[in-house]
Amino acid sequence: MTTEQRYESAKEIYKAIGVDTEAAIAKLQKFPISMHCWQGDDVVGFDHEGPLSGGIQTTGNYPGKATTPEELMADIDQALSLIPGKHRLNLHASYAIFEPGEFVDRDKLEPKHFQKWVDFAKQRGIGIDFNPTFFSHDKVVNGLTLSSPIKEVRDFWIRHGIVCLKIAEYFATELGTPCELNYWIPDGYKDVPADRTAPRARFKDSMDQILATPYDKSKVLVALESKVFGIGVESYTVGSSEFTVNYAARNGILSLMDNGHYHPTEVVSDKIPSMLLFNDKIALHVTRGVRWDSDHVVIFDDETKEIAKEIVRNDAMDRVLLGLDFFDASINRISAWVVGMRNMQKAMLFALLQPNEKLAKLQNDSEFTELMMLQEELKLYPFGDVWNYFCKTNGVPEKEDWFAEVQKYEKDVLSKRL
Ligand code: RNT
Ligand code: ZN
């Protein structure tokens, strides 16, 4: 049977339970995912030599990682060519591109240092999201940035936060689409702190100073990301969930939830509906923590599906700004991107193909036996036939067929980088 025939058959099967596959596909087609540039080079960037710091870690030494802007752009192109639909690119400030011999510190960055990224995005018709980089830098003193007790340190990072507002505005203006600007700081303590308040008060004041800078709120969507702990920062994190959610609510910015940033049995899927009741928009980092915030590649697992279901059931595909955030250095990095992006899309499609109203009615009617039965049976509906059709209509390989392209690219391009 051809892909189309399989799709037609699946369409009828879904129709019988009241699910419109055409409508599901149309919605998925319009849902952009912000693809993080940092999977391509193990979160290194182009503005420093030292190791990755800030309590986050990549593990593995798979050959062929991108070490120049040209290589990273080529790898991003290769990944995007195997992912259906149109997406966005998520950059970090550490990916500034300098002229040969030029170096500009983080507090002096200007839009021009990102002009090559704008050209790249323009040529591909995609938007850019952005992140100040508060790690992997010698001005992170004793693990602290915006919450440092040293004024000079705080001021440096406040200036960094401010220049990033300007750069985000530049992206939005040039590309004609708002830029999500996500602030995440690694600040915290390895061991039991004596004062949990003062660092948070300093962080609050630093953020206030950054956001006091005028910027176009229709162009720059500022987000603040929380975290529970990091490597070497196990006992106390300044930007905890309570801090960021309250700060965001009070200051009219977005909360960003990363599903690796909570206690292991705490799930972001359950937080989404509450956040949507009180916020026009929310931002997400979808990742996969294995036993800790390990940033494994996103797979088609239960929590990814639950996150997607909450976005779909709340009719919030245009209210949730979704980016991926993982970094695996132990496998082909392009494959990591493609697997993660395609899995996030699969989770969205899976959610769109559930008879959500019918399921909600069963819950409301207290028909819990039937609800459990149906939710389980739906797992084996011919979802893959709809997915393959979606890939085909988008001109990207179906099933595992994309992998041959990655292997070819590894042989022709990545292996020559050694
Ligand atoms: C770290 C945060 C943060 C980073 C990226 C690189 O725990 O998740 O989002 O992963 O900014
Ligand atoms: Zn994150």
Image: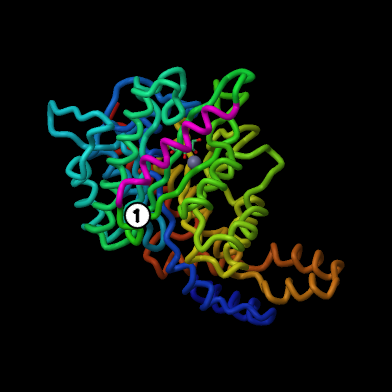
* Residue 164, image quadrant: top left
Above or below 303: residue 44: above
* Res. 305 visible in picture: no
Q: In the rendering, at what x and y percent does residue 22 appear? A: 51, 78
Predominant secondary structure, magenta span: helix
Q: Position of residue 268 (x, y in %)?
A: 62, 49
> Which scheme is used to colour this image of the protein?
rainbow
Residue at image point 56% right, 40% down: 243
The answer to whether 348 is drawn above or below residue 417 in the figure is: below
How many numbered dots are placed on residues in this image?
Answer: 1
Q: Quadrant of the C terminus?
A: top left
Tell me if residue 262 comes above or below residue 307 in the rendering: above
Question: Residue 236, located in which quarter of the rendered image?
Answer: top right
Decide if ligand 1 comes within 8 Å of the CB at mark 1.
no
Q: Residue at x 48, y 38 (%)?
A: 204
From the viewer's side, name the closer residue of 375 and 7: 375
Front residue of 97/62: it is 97
Task: Say whether residue 302 is visible.
Answer: yes
| Kind of residue at disc 1 | Val
Mark 1, residue position: 220
The stretch of residues the image draws in magenta is: 196-214
User: Does the segment drawn in magenta span residue 168?
Assistant: no
Residue 318 pos. (x, y %): 47, 66
| Residue 348 locus on image (x, y percent) | 55, 62
State yes or no: residue 204 in magenta: yes
In the image shown, does 25 or 10 lie closer to the viewer?
Answer: 25
Q: Residue at position x 58%, y 62% from top?
A: 311
Name the secondary structure under disc 1: strand
Task: State left or right for residue 238 relative to residue 19.
Answer: left
Residue depicted at x 55% and y 79%: 8
